[in-house]
Amino acid sequence: MSDLPLRAQMAVALGRTAAKMSRLAGRGDGSVIGGRIGLKLDPELLTRLARDRKLVLVSATNGKTTTTRLITSAMTPLGQIATNAFGANMPTGHVSALAAAPDAKYGVLECDEKYVPLVLRETGANVVALMNLSRDQMDRAAEIWLLAGKWRKALEAAPHSHVIANCDDPLVTWGASTAKSVTWVAAGQHWREDSWSCPECGGPLDREGVDWGCRECSFSRPKPDWILHGERVTAPGGRTYELTGLQLPGRANRSNAVIALAVVSQFGVEPETALPLLAQVKSVAGRYTTVEHEGRTIRLLLSKNPAGWLEAFDVLQPAPGPVALSINAQGPDGRDTSWLWDVDYRILRGRPVWATGERRLDLAARLEAADVDFTLVDDIDQAVMAVPPGHLDVIANYTAFQHIRTRYGRVV
Protein backbone atom coordinates (compact mmCIF):
# COMPACT_ATOMS: atom_id res chain seq x y z
CA MET A 1 0.00 0.00 0.00
CA SER A 2 2.94 2.33 0.67
CA ASP A 3 3.80 2.38 -3.05
CA LEU A 4 0.48 4.06 -3.86
CA PRO A 5 0.50 7.78 -4.67
CA LEU A 6 -0.28 10.00 -1.67
CA ARG A 7 -3.75 10.83 -3.04
CA ALA A 8 -4.59 7.13 -3.32
CA GLN A 9 -3.30 6.44 0.19
CA MET A 10 -5.54 9.21 1.54
CA ALA A 11 -8.49 7.83 -0.43
CA VAL A 12 -7.95 4.36 1.06
CA ALA A 13 -7.59 5.71 4.59
CA LEU A 14 -10.74 7.86 4.41
CA GLY A 15 -12.68 5.02 2.80
CA ARG A 16 -11.71 2.69 5.64
CA THR A 17 -12.78 5.29 8.19
CA ALA A 18 -16.15 5.72 6.51
CA ALA A 19 -16.63 1.95 6.38
CA LYS A 20 -15.83 1.60 10.07
CA MET A 21 -18.29 4.35 10.97
CA SER A 22 -20.96 2.65 8.87
CA ARG A 23 -20.42 -0.63 10.72
CA LEU A 24 -20.52 1.08 14.11
CA ALA A 25 -23.77 2.78 13.14
CA GLY A 26 -25.29 -0.57 12.15
CA ARG A 27 -25.71 0.51 8.53
CA GLY A 28 -24.03 -2.54 6.98
CA ASP A 29 -20.49 -3.77 6.50
CA GLY A 30 -19.35 -0.44 5.03
CA SER A 31 -17.91 -1.85 1.82
CA VAL A 32 -20.06 0.31 -0.47
CA ILE A 33 -19.64 3.65 1.30
CA GLY A 34 -15.93 3.03 1.84
CA GLY A 35 -15.33 2.33 -1.83
CA ARG A 36 -17.55 5.21 -2.92
CA ILE A 37 -15.55 7.73 -0.92
CA GLY A 38 -12.27 6.22 -2.10
CA LEU A 39 -13.29 6.53 -5.76
CA LYS A 40 -14.53 10.11 -5.25
CA LEU A 41 -11.11 11.11 -3.98
CA ASP A 42 -9.18 9.08 -6.57
CA PRO A 43 -11.17 7.92 -9.64
CA GLU A 44 -8.27 5.63 -10.63
CA LEU A 45 -8.17 3.89 -7.26
CA LEU A 46 -9.48 0.54 -8.51
CA THR A 47 -6.78 0.37 -11.18
CA ARG A 48 -4.09 1.30 -8.67
CA LEU A 49 -5.23 -1.28 -6.12
CA ALA A 50 -5.47 -4.04 -8.76
CA ARG A 51 -1.94 -3.48 -10.06
CA ASP A 52 0.52 -6.37 -9.57
CA ARG A 53 -2.20 -8.74 -8.36
CA LYS A 54 -3.58 -11.86 -9.97
CA LEU A 55 -7.34 -11.32 -10.11
CA VAL A 56 -10.42 -13.39 -10.86
CA LEU A 57 -13.73 -11.78 -11.82
CA VAL A 58 -16.83 -13.94 -11.26
CA SER A 59 -20.06 -12.99 -12.98
CA ALA A 60 -23.49 -14.54 -13.63
CA THR A 61 -27.14 -13.86 -13.02
CA ASN A 62 -27.26 -16.53 -10.30
CA GLY A 63 -24.58 -18.11 -8.13
CA LYS A 64 -21.80 -15.54 -8.33
CA THR A 65 -21.61 -14.88 -4.57
CA THR A 66 -21.44 -18.61 -3.82
CA THR A 67 -18.90 -19.32 -6.56
CA THR A 68 -16.74 -16.42 -5.40
CA ARG A 69 -16.69 -17.93 -1.91
CA LEU A 70 -15.87 -21.40 -3.29
CA ILE A 71 -13.00 -20.11 -5.43
CA THR A 72 -11.62 -18.09 -2.52
CA SER A 73 -11.69 -21.13 -0.26
CA ALA A 74 -9.95 -23.31 -2.85
CA MET A 75 -7.22 -20.71 -3.42
CA THR A 76 -6.21 -20.39 0.24
CA PRO A 77 -3.07 -22.56 -0.26
CA LEU A 78 -1.71 -19.68 -2.36
CA GLY A 79 -1.83 -17.22 0.55
CA GLN A 80 -4.07 -14.31 1.48
CA ILE A 81 -6.94 -13.66 -0.94
CA ALA A 82 -8.65 -10.28 -1.33
CA THR A 83 -12.37 -10.79 -1.92
CA ASN A 84 -15.77 -9.11 -1.63
CA ALA A 85 -17.24 -11.99 0.30
CA PHE A 86 -20.64 -10.45 1.05
CA GLY A 87 -21.73 -9.47 -2.42
CA ALA A 88 -20.77 -5.79 -2.85
CA ASN A 89 -20.17 -6.53 -6.51
CA MET A 90 -19.74 -3.12 -8.14
CA PRO A 91 -16.52 -1.04 -8.34
CA THR A 92 -17.14 0.49 -4.90
CA GLY A 93 -17.16 -2.98 -3.35
CA HIS A 94 -14.10 -4.02 -5.37
CA VAL A 95 -12.14 -1.03 -4.09
CA SER A 96 -13.07 -1.87 -0.50
CA ALA A 97 -12.13 -5.53 -0.92
CA LEU A 98 -8.71 -4.78 -2.41
CA ALA A 99 -7.99 -1.98 0.07
CA ALA A 100 -8.82 -4.29 2.97
CA ALA A 101 -6.13 -6.76 1.89
CA PRO A 102 -3.20 -4.63 0.69
CA ASP A 103 -0.67 -7.46 0.88
CA ALA A 104 -2.79 -10.08 -0.91
CA LYS A 105 -1.23 -11.13 -4.21
CA TYR A 106 -4.48 -12.73 -5.34
CA GLY A 107 -8.02 -11.43 -5.53
CA VAL A 108 -11.39 -13.05 -6.26
CA LEU A 109 -14.06 -10.45 -7.03
CA GLU A 110 -17.74 -11.06 -7.60
CA CYS A 111 -18.78 -8.69 -10.39
CA ASP A 112 -22.26 -7.52 -11.35
CA GLU A 113 -23.00 -8.55 -14.94
CA LYS A 114 -23.35 -4.95 -16.13
CA TYR A 115 -19.99 -3.94 -14.69
CA VAL A 116 -17.86 -6.68 -16.24
CA PRO A 117 -16.60 -4.46 -19.12
CA LEU A 118 -15.69 -1.56 -16.82
CA VAL A 119 -14.03 -3.67 -14.12
CA LEU A 120 -12.17 -5.80 -16.65
CA ARG A 121 -10.85 -2.68 -18.35
CA GLU A 122 -9.72 -1.11 -15.08
CA THR A 123 -8.21 -4.21 -13.46
CA GLY A 124 -6.95 -6.30 -16.38
CA ALA A 125 -8.15 -9.39 -14.51
CA ASN A 126 -6.21 -12.56 -15.25
CA VAL A 127 -9.27 -14.83 -15.21
CA VAL A 128 -12.94 -14.10 -15.89
CA ALA A 129 -15.51 -16.75 -14.88
CA LEU A 130 -18.88 -16.51 -16.66
CA MET A 131 -21.58 -18.94 -15.55
CA ASN A 132 -25.14 -18.10 -16.66
CA LEU A 133 -27.40 -15.35 -17.99
CA SER A 134 -31.15 -15.17 -17.45
CA ARG A 135 -33.87 -12.58 -16.89
CA ASP A 136 -33.35 -10.64 -13.68
CA GLN A 137 -35.11 -7.51 -12.38
CA MET A 138 -36.17 -6.28 -15.81
CA ASP A 139 -37.01 -2.79 -14.54
CA ARG A 140 -33.41 -2.18 -13.47
CA ALA A 141 -31.18 -4.66 -15.32
CA ALA A 142 -30.31 -4.61 -19.01
CA GLU A 143 -31.78 -7.11 -21.46
CA ILE A 144 -29.57 -10.17 -21.26
CA TRP A 145 -28.67 -10.25 -24.96
CA LEU A 146 -27.33 -6.71 -24.55
CA LEU A 147 -25.26 -7.85 -21.57
CA ALA A 148 -23.82 -10.76 -23.53
CA GLY A 149 -22.97 -8.38 -26.37
CA LYS A 150 -21.11 -6.09 -23.99
CA TRP A 151 -19.18 -9.09 -22.62
CA ARG A 152 -18.12 -9.93 -26.19
CA LYS A 153 -16.72 -6.46 -26.83
CA ALA A 154 -14.97 -6.33 -23.46
CA LEU A 155 -13.32 -9.74 -23.85
CA GLU A 156 -12.22 -9.01 -27.39
CA ALA A 157 -10.38 -5.97 -26.02
CA ALA A 158 -8.75 -8.00 -23.21
CA PRO A 159 -6.47 -10.53 -24.97
CA HIS A 160 -4.47 -11.29 -21.82
CA SER A 161 -7.50 -12.38 -19.78
CA HIS A 162 -8.35 -16.09 -19.71
CA VAL A 163 -12.06 -16.94 -19.62
CA ILE A 164 -13.75 -19.84 -17.81
CA ALA A 165 -17.21 -20.13 -19.39
CA ASN A 166 -20.22 -22.42 -19.07
CA CYS A 167 -20.70 -23.86 -22.56
CA ASP A 168 -24.12 -25.30 -21.63
CA ASP A 169 -25.54 -21.74 -21.63
CA PRO A 170 -25.77 -20.45 -25.23
CA LEU A 171 -25.79 -16.79 -24.17
CA VAL A 172 -22.70 -17.24 -22.02
CA THR A 173 -21.01 -19.10 -24.87
CA TRP A 174 -21.79 -16.29 -27.27
CA GLY A 175 -20.62 -13.67 -24.77
CA ALA A 176 -17.32 -15.51 -24.20
CA SER A 177 -16.60 -16.53 -27.78
CA THR A 178 -14.55 -13.43 -28.64
CA ALA A 179 -12.03 -14.13 -25.88
CA LYS A 180 -8.55 -15.12 -27.04
CA SER A 181 -8.30 -17.94 -24.51
CA VAL A 182 -11.26 -19.91 -23.12
CA THR A 183 -11.71 -22.98 -20.93
CA TRP A 184 -15.15 -24.40 -21.63
CA VAL A 185 -17.01 -25.99 -18.72
CA ALA A 186 -20.11 -28.16 -19.08
CA ALA A 187 -21.66 -26.92 -15.84
CA GLY A 188 -25.29 -27.50 -16.83
CA GLN A 189 -28.18 -25.20 -17.66
CA HIS A 190 -31.37 -25.92 -15.74
CA TRP A 191 -33.31 -22.77 -16.71
CA ARG A 192 -33.57 -22.67 -20.51
CA GLU A 193 -36.46 -20.30 -21.06
CA ASP A 194 -34.17 -17.42 -22.05
CA SER A 195 -32.09 -19.28 -24.60
CA TRP A 196 -34.25 -20.85 -27.29
CA SER A 197 -33.02 -18.45 -29.99
CA CYS A 198 -29.53 -18.13 -31.44
CA PRO A 199 -27.80 -14.96 -30.17
CA GLU A 200 -25.64 -14.93 -33.30
CA CYS A 201 -28.34 -14.87 -35.98
CA GLY A 202 -31.71 -15.08 -34.20
CA GLY A 203 -32.58 -18.51 -35.57
CA PRO A 204 -34.01 -21.33 -33.45
CA LEU A 205 -31.69 -23.38 -31.27
CA ASP A 206 -32.05 -27.15 -31.50
CA ARG A 207 -31.24 -29.21 -28.41
CA GLU A 208 -30.45 -32.90 -28.19
CA GLY A 209 -29.45 -34.00 -24.71
CA VAL A 210 -26.74 -31.64 -23.51
CA ASP A 211 -25.81 -30.53 -27.04
CA TRP A 212 -27.29 -27.49 -28.70
CA GLY A 213 -26.80 -25.74 -32.02
CA CYS A 214 -28.41 -23.18 -34.28
CA ARG A 215 -30.58 -24.49 -37.11
CA GLU A 216 -29.63 -21.59 -39.39
CA CYS A 217 -25.95 -20.80 -38.70
CA SER A 218 -22.81 -22.50 -37.39
CA PHE A 219 -23.17 -21.34 -33.77
CA SER A 220 -23.13 -24.44 -31.54
CA ARG A 221 -21.99 -25.79 -28.20
CA PRO A 222 -18.19 -25.93 -27.92
CA LYS A 223 -16.44 -29.10 -26.81
CA PRO A 224 -16.09 -28.86 -23.02
CA ASP A 225 -12.78 -29.16 -21.19
CA TRP A 226 -14.42 -29.83 -17.80
CA ILE A 227 -17.64 -31.85 -17.57
CA LEU A 228 -20.12 -32.05 -14.71
CA HIS A 229 -22.26 -35.19 -14.73
CA GLY A 230 -24.39 -35.75 -11.65
CA GLU A 231 -22.16 -35.69 -8.61
CA ARG A 232 -18.94 -36.23 -10.56
CA VAL A 233 -16.70 -33.94 -12.57
CA THR A 234 -14.30 -34.95 -15.31
CA ALA A 235 -11.20 -32.77 -15.62
CA PRO A 236 -9.10 -32.19 -18.75
CA GLY A 237 -7.13 -35.38 -19.33
CA GLY A 238 -10.06 -37.59 -18.33
CA ARG A 239 -9.65 -38.03 -14.58
CA THR A 240 -12.96 -38.03 -12.68
CA TYR A 241 -13.59 -36.63 -9.19
CA GLU A 242 -16.54 -37.03 -6.83
CA LEU A 243 -18.39 -33.95 -5.55
CA THR A 244 -20.21 -35.86 -2.81
CA GLY A 245 -18.26 -34.02 -0.09
CA LEU A 246 -19.85 -30.65 -0.86
CA GLN A 247 -21.90 -29.27 2.03
CA LEU A 248 -23.78 -26.73 -0.10
CA PRO A 249 -26.89 -28.52 -1.42
CA GLY A 250 -28.34 -29.00 -4.88
CA ARG A 251 -27.33 -29.20 -8.52
CA ALA A 252 -26.73 -25.44 -8.78
CA ASN A 253 -23.94 -25.70 -6.23
CA ARG A 254 -22.39 -28.61 -8.06
CA SER A 255 -22.35 -26.33 -11.10
CA ASN A 256 -20.73 -23.60 -9.02
CA ALA A 257 -18.15 -26.09 -7.74
CA VAL A 258 -17.01 -27.26 -11.18
CA ILE A 259 -16.57 -23.63 -12.26
CA ALA A 260 -14.48 -23.09 -9.13
CA LEU A 261 -12.33 -26.13 -9.90
CA ALA A 262 -11.69 -24.88 -13.44
CA VAL A 263 -10.76 -21.41 -12.15
CA VAL A 264 -8.32 -22.49 -9.46
CA SER A 265 -6.60 -24.92 -11.82
CA GLN A 266 -5.44 -21.84 -13.73
CA PHE A 267 -3.40 -20.94 -10.66
CA GLY A 268 -1.97 -24.42 -10.18
CA VAL A 269 -4.42 -25.66 -7.51
CA GLU A 270 -5.31 -29.22 -8.47
CA PRO A 271 -8.69 -30.85 -7.75
CA GLU A 272 -7.17 -33.13 -5.10
CA THR A 273 -6.24 -30.00 -3.13
CA ALA A 274 -9.28 -27.92 -4.02
CA LEU A 275 -12.10 -30.38 -3.29
CA PRO A 276 -11.57 -30.63 0.51
CA LEU A 277 -11.45 -26.82 0.63
CA LEU A 278 -14.72 -26.52 -1.32
CA ALA A 279 -16.28 -28.92 1.19
CA GLN A 280 -15.47 -26.52 4.04
CA VAL A 281 -17.99 -23.96 2.74
CA LYS A 282 -21.28 -24.50 4.57
CA SER A 283 -23.16 -21.25 3.94
CA VAL A 284 -22.60 -18.06 1.95
CA ALA A 285 -23.78 -14.70 3.29
CA GLY A 286 -26.62 -16.54 5.05
CA ARG A 287 -27.64 -18.67 2.06
CA TYR A 288 -28.46 -22.29 3.02
CA THR A 289 -27.94 -21.49 6.71
CA THR A 290 -30.20 -23.11 9.28
CA VAL A 291 -31.18 -21.25 12.44
CA GLU A 292 -33.06 -22.50 15.49
CA HIS A 293 -36.07 -20.56 16.77
CA GLU A 294 -38.70 -21.74 19.25
CA GLY A 295 -38.12 -25.39 18.37
CA ARG A 296 -38.17 -24.73 14.62
CA THR A 297 -35.18 -25.36 12.37
CA ILE A 298 -35.39 -22.66 9.71
CA ARG A 299 -33.35 -22.99 6.53
CA LEU A 300 -32.86 -19.76 4.55
CA LEU A 301 -32.85 -19.87 0.75
CA LEU A 302 -32.30 -16.77 -1.41
CA SER A 303 -34.12 -16.64 -4.73
CA LYS A 304 -34.53 -13.43 -6.73
CA ASN A 305 -35.55 -14.45 -10.28
CA PRO A 306 -37.20 -17.38 -12.10
CA ALA A 307 -33.97 -19.33 -12.59
CA GLY A 308 -33.12 -18.92 -8.90
CA TRP A 309 -36.53 -20.18 -7.79
CA LEU A 310 -36.04 -23.29 -9.90
CA GLU A 311 -32.81 -24.03 -8.03
CA ALA A 312 -34.41 -23.30 -4.65
CA PHE A 313 -37.16 -25.82 -5.37
CA ASP A 314 -34.45 -28.38 -6.15
CA VAL A 315 -33.16 -28.34 -2.56
CA LEU A 316 -36.44 -28.27 -0.63
CA GLN A 317 -37.07 -30.90 2.00
CA PRO A 318 -39.10 -33.78 0.52
CA ALA A 319 -42.85 -33.20 0.33
CA PRO A 320 -44.91 -32.55 2.35
CA GLY A 321 -42.33 -30.36 4.12
CA PRO A 322 -43.58 -26.84 4.91
CA VAL A 323 -42.39 -23.76 3.00
CA ALA A 324 -42.65 -20.03 3.69
CA LEU A 325 -42.29 -17.63 0.74
CA SER A 326 -41.51 -13.92 1.13
CA ILE A 327 -41.47 -11.32 -1.65
CA ASN A 328 -40.54 -7.64 -1.48
CA ALA A 329 -40.15 -5.14 -4.33
CA GLN A 330 -37.72 -2.58 -3.00
CA GLY A 331 -34.94 -1.04 -5.06
CA PRO A 332 -32.45 -3.94 -4.77
CA ASP A 333 -35.23 -6.42 -5.64
CA GLY A 334 -36.60 -4.55 -8.63
CA ARG A 335 -40.02 -2.92 -8.42
CA ASP A 336 -41.60 -5.15 -11.04
CA THR A 337 -42.93 -8.48 -9.72
CA SER A 338 -44.34 -9.71 -13.05
CA TRP A 339 -41.50 -12.29 -13.15
CA LEU A 340 -43.45 -14.30 -10.55
CA TRP A 341 -45.60 -15.55 -13.45
CA ASP A 342 -42.54 -17.18 -15.04
CA VAL A 343 -42.03 -19.42 -11.98
CA ASP A 344 -43.81 -22.78 -11.98
CA TYR A 345 -45.13 -22.95 -8.42
CA ARG A 346 -47.10 -26.16 -9.05
CA ILE A 347 -44.20 -28.08 -7.48
CA LEU A 348 -45.41 -26.75 -4.11
CA ARG A 349 -48.77 -28.50 -4.34
CA GLY A 350 -49.38 -30.77 -1.37
CA ARG A 351 -47.14 -28.80 0.98
CA PRO A 352 -48.17 -26.37 3.73
CA VAL A 353 -47.28 -22.98 2.20
CA TRP A 354 -47.24 -19.52 3.77
CA ALA A 355 -47.00 -16.32 1.73
CA THR A 356 -45.63 -13.10 3.20
CA GLY A 357 -43.55 -10.05 2.40
CA GLU A 358 -44.43 -6.56 1.21
CA ARG A 359 -45.78 -7.93 -2.07
CA ARG A 360 -47.51 -10.96 -0.62
CA LEU A 361 -50.72 -10.18 -2.54
CA ASP A 362 -48.83 -10.43 -5.85
CA LEU A 363 -47.44 -13.75 -4.66
CA ALA A 364 -50.86 -14.89 -3.50
CA ALA A 365 -52.39 -14.21 -6.91
CA ARG A 366 -49.66 -16.28 -8.57
CA LEU A 367 -50.05 -19.19 -6.12
CA GLU A 368 -53.81 -19.17 -6.56
CA ALA A 369 -53.41 -19.36 -10.34
CA ALA A 370 -51.11 -22.37 -9.87
CA ASP A 371 -53.71 -24.11 -7.65
CA VAL A 372 -51.35 -24.10 -4.69
CA ASP A 373 -53.05 -24.01 -1.30
CA PHE A 374 -51.46 -21.36 0.93
CA THR A 375 -51.98 -19.19 3.97
CA LEU A 376 -51.47 -15.44 3.69
CA VAL A 377 -49.69 -13.92 6.72
CA ASP A 378 -48.55 -10.42 7.59
CA ASP A 379 -44.97 -11.28 8.51
CA ILE A 380 -42.49 -14.13 8.67
CA ASP A 381 -42.98 -14.59 12.44
CA GLN A 382 -46.58 -15.64 11.88
CA ALA A 383 -45.48 -18.24 9.35
CA VAL A 384 -42.73 -19.61 11.60
CA MET A 385 -44.99 -19.92 14.63
CA ALA A 386 -47.74 -21.56 12.56
CA VAL A 387 -45.42 -24.46 11.73
CA PRO A 388 -45.20 -27.31 14.26
CA PRO A 389 -41.74 -27.70 15.79
CA GLY A 390 -39.44 -29.14 13.15
CA HIS A 391 -38.01 -28.08 9.79
CA LEU A 392 -39.15 -25.07 7.74
CA ASP A 393 -37.68 -23.96 4.41
CA VAL A 394 -37.91 -20.21 3.79
CA ILE A 395 -37.47 -18.87 0.25
CA ALA A 396 -37.18 -15.10 -0.09
CA ASN A 397 -35.97 -12.52 -2.57
CA TYR A 398 -33.17 -10.13 -1.72
CA THR A 399 -34.47 -7.56 0.78
CA ALA A 400 -36.95 -10.03 2.27
CA PHE A 401 -34.07 -12.47 2.75
CA GLN A 402 -31.93 -9.86 4.46
CA HIS A 403 -34.80 -8.93 6.79
CA ILE A 404 -35.38 -12.58 7.75
CA ARG A 405 -31.67 -13.21 8.10
CA THR A 406 -31.39 -10.31 10.55
CA ARG A 407 -34.57 -11.25 12.39
CA TYR A 408 -33.36 -14.75 13.24
CA GLY A 409 -29.68 -14.03 13.80
CA ARG A 410 -27.39 -12.59 11.14
CA VAL A 411 -25.07 -15.34 9.96
CA VAL A 412 -22.37 -15.59 7.31
Image (cartoon, grey):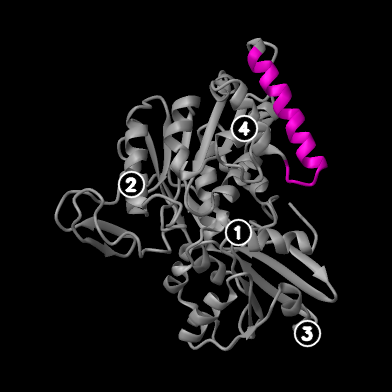
Measured Cα–Cα span from mark 4 to mark 3: 46 Å
Q: Which residue is drawn at 45% across and 76% down?
A: 344
Q: Can residue 112 be seen in this view?
A: yes
Q: Are marks 1 and 3 in contact (CB under 8 Å)?
A: no
Of tags 2 and 4, which is closer to the observer?
4
| Above/below status of 312 relative to 99 | below
| Above/below status of 3 relative to 116 | above
Crowding at dot 1, Cα within 10 Å, few <14 / some 14-19 / many 20+, comes out as: many
Position in image of residue 246 (x %, y %): 63, 56
Of tags 4 and 3, which is closer to the observer?
4
Return the residue at label 1.
398
Q: Quadrant where the N terminus lies?
A: top right
Position in image of residue 364 (x %, y %): 55, 81
The three-letter amino acid code for the residue at tag 3 is Pro
**Magenta segment range?**
7-29
| Residue 398 painted magenta | no
Position in image of residue 240 (x %, y %): 50, 51
Q: Which residue is drawn at 47% across and 49% down?
A: 60
Measured Cα–Cα span from mark 2 to mark 4: 27 Å
Return the residue at label 3.
388
Picture quadrant of residue 401: bottom right
Crowding at dot 3, Cα within 10 Å, few <14 / some 14-19 / many 20+, comes out as: few
The three-letter amino acid code for the residue at tag 2 is Leu
Return the residue at label 4.
36
Q: In this view, does 240 lie to the left or right of 100?
A: left
Return the residue at label 2.
146
